[in-house]
Image: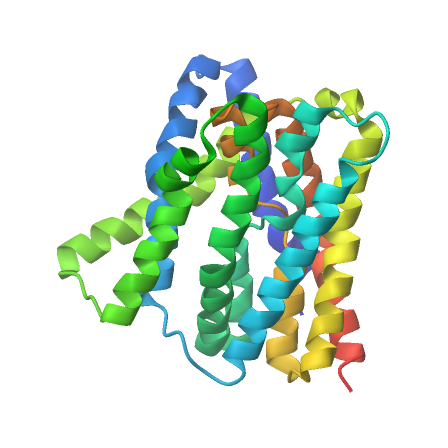
Amino acid sequence: MPSPLALLPDFLLIALGFVLCRRTSLDRRVWEGVERLVYWLLFPVLLFTSIARSPLQGTQTFAVAAAGMATVAIGIALASAVRLAPGVDARLHASGAQTVFRFNSYIALAMSERLGGAAGVATMALVIAVTVPLCNVAAVWPLARHGGHSYLRELARNPLILSTVGGLLANLAGVRFPDAIGTALQRLGVAALPLGLMAVGAGLQLGRLAAAPRLAAAFLALRHVAMPMVALAFAAALGLGATPRAIVVLFAALPTSAASYVLAARMGGDGPFVAGLVTVSTVLAMVGIPLWLAIAAATGG
């Protein structure tokens, strides 16, 4: 079972970005460029290569993908419902709602290998492939509506959606890159995680969560309590075996995506509010992932 310390390196990278931005010459102007690099190139390359190279078949993978899609759909509905509560700030809701249903795919792929080896990675890659487009469509919609952007144009140019679709098409077509190109793409993707997490830290203003503490608490409770409970219910309903069930629950218990901050910042949302949510989510996941996996093992029958 993964240790609570498994996510500590990611939290340390966030802290490093915070310190570098405030205590060195690498100030906000530098990190704004890093944010653009991560959003438009590094994150998309990592998604593309992960999906394009992973075998999308295996025992119960269809059921696992269905459980992942259903869990995300419930998360989107719950996050949207929060907007109906009295006194909710529209801009903060549009910025932070995505943190309920988006997920850190890099941690997902790393930890799924510990749960199920190569088969676990392939299963998680399929879940990522089918849920990333849905997550990004749901994340872009409120930000586009609030910021006055064209929704269809934002979707058509969203690099995460394009890279996911491209990765699926490349996988289905059996595309294989020459070694030099494949290695270059892999190295670009590897750079996404540390730079993305440090960019989150550079934009961090935990005090910004104080602007809407109840809204922040609602988003975090949905992300780290409601979503894993929903995943457990779907896993039980579909009769998933031990490893597929663990993959589904791991997926639901992941910390929210570091790209949530980048998307909010790029589309005129409240980046610092989302950065705080991402950081707290990462801390909660350090404890939550082992706990929910233990519950999944104990209730699996």
* Nearest to the observer: residue 156 or residue 124: 156
Give how far across and how far down residue 52 sits, in percent.
31, 63
Is 241 located above or below residue 34 in the figure?
below
Residue lying at 30% horizontally and 55% vertically, measured from the top left: 166
The quadrant of the rendering that contains the N terminus is: bottom right
* Nearest to the observer: residue 6 or residue 173: 173
The quadrant of the rendering that contains the C terminus is: bottom right
Residue lying at 54% horizontally and 70% vertically, measured from the top left: 65
Residue lying at 30% horizontally and 45% vertically, measured from the top left: 188
The picture quadrant where one finds residue 167 is bottom left
Is 81 located above or below residue 181 in the figure?
above
* Nearest to the observer: residue 191 or residue 50: 50
The picture quadrant where one finds residue 226 is bottom right
Q: Can see residue 43?
A: no
Give how far across and how far down residue 184 sits, in percent.
22, 49
| Left or right, 180 with reference to 65 | left
Is 145 located above or below residue 130 in the figure?
above
The picture quadrant where one finds residue 48 is bottom left
